[in-house]
Amino acid sequence: MLHIWIKKRITLRGATYHYYNVKEYGNGCIILEPRELSVPKSISARTLADMDHAVSNFKCGDVSTAIVLSDL
């Protein structure tokens, strides 16, 4: 059973998945496609290169100024 609230929220009873991709069309049709979240098997080479660059900057002292949180 599908029920749409005034605030565009959906109540879906008996759902077989936790997450859905939702598409709403102008004619009022709503399509729910199951979305399964998965953990990537590895970190991409680009991400590893960015991490290496950040660590080398940190070790060389090339860092931004400290953030003062006392004002918050």
Image (cartoon, rainbow, N blue to C red):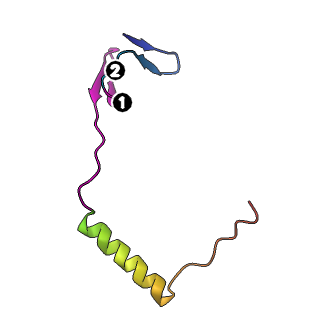
Toward the bottom, the furthest residue is: 60
Residue beneath disc 2: 15
Amino acid type indicated by mark 1: His
| Residue 14: x %, y % from top left | 35, 16
| Residue 20: x %, y % from top left | 33, 30
Q: Nearer the viewer, residue 64 or 52?
A: 52
Toward the top, the furthest residue is: 1
Residue 11 falls left or right of residue 71: left
Label 2 neighbourhood size at 10 Å, few (<14), some (14-19), many (20+)?
A: few
Q: Which region is colored magenta? A: 17-42
Residue 41 falls left or right of residue 20: left
Question: In which quadrant will I find the C terminus?
Answer: bottom right
Residue 53 counted in the magenta span = no
| Residue 69: x %, y % from top left | 70, 66
Residue beneath disc 1: 18
Label 1 neighbourhood size at 10 Å, few (<14), some (14-19), many (20+)?
A: few
Contact? badges 2 and 1 (CB < 8 Å): yes
Q: Residue at x 53, y 81 (%)?
A: 63
